[in-house]
Amino acid sequence: MFVTGLLLAAESSPHLGVPWQSLAYNGETLLGSTLETARECGFDQLIVTLGTASEQIHDRVDFDGVRVVESPHADTGSSSIVPALDAVDRRTDGIVVLLGDQPGITSAAVWSLVAEVAGPSTPLGISHYDDGPGYPVWCARELFGSLRQLRSDDDLWQLTDHHPVTQVDAIGNIPTRIRTWPDYHRTLGHPQSDNTSLST
């Protein structure tokens, strides 16, 4: 089975006031860290979407071996998944969607998801944590037509109303998305800090 990883990193975080992709995290940048996890998954193809801060991010993140898709309208709510589909390899059986601002997602969660959907046709696979559904999400090629109709990336979840869903157990609670400074500092383990430095 040929699997494409799609790491969504085009949206900005207005509550941060700076590109979240460049925040210092685990000795590198936040996007660099989630991208490294995506590489560990061993996808046959890896695509990353970038938005309006693309130029700044390219200066700080290594995209070697990654197909970058520019999605400058993501900040206005447009889906970055839609333009990314044009870059998906024609051999791809499906895509695994990940979020660049959610560093707690593990390669093990991705492997569990792919192993579960690799059998008989599974159009839509959702990771199910202790506190509900979350990413990574599997979308088989047969759903690409529906994906092209998305108005925003969050509309991906509306597919569960129209297609059979396979829920795959994931360990723990849904990993935190870093959208605010409290999210960031809590993820780093010092929730009381108000330091907003981007230095690595």
Image (spheres, grey):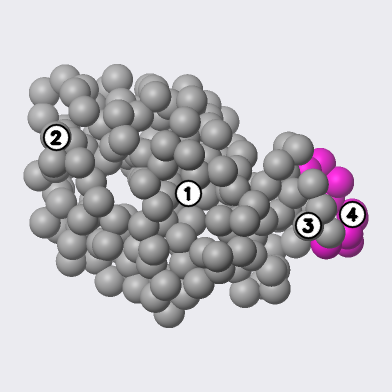
Which marked residue is nearer to the observer: mark 2 or mark 4? 2
Q: CA distance from mark 2 to mark 1?
A: 23 Å
Which marked residue is nearer to the observer: mark 1 or mark 3? 3
Badges 2 and 1: C-beta atoms under 8 Å apart? no
Mark 2 — residue? 91
Q: CA distance from mark 1 to mark 3?
A: 20 Å
Left or right of 28, for residue 119: left
Quadrant of residue 5 within the rendered picture: top left
Secondary element type, mark 1 = strand
Where is 99 relative to 140, above or below? Answer: below
- In percent of width and height, residue 152 lies at 34, 68
Badges 2 and 4: C-beta atoms under 8 Å apart? no
Q: Amino acid at mark 4?
A: Gln
Instruction: Inspect this view and state whether residue 133 appears.
Output: no
Q: Amino acid at mark 2?
A: Arg
Left or right of 2, for residue 60: right
Secondary element type, mark 3 = loop
Which residue is rendered at x = 42% and y = 72% of the image?
72
Mark 3 — residue? 198
Mark 4 — residue? 192
Secondary element type, mark 2 = loop
Mark 1 — residue? 99
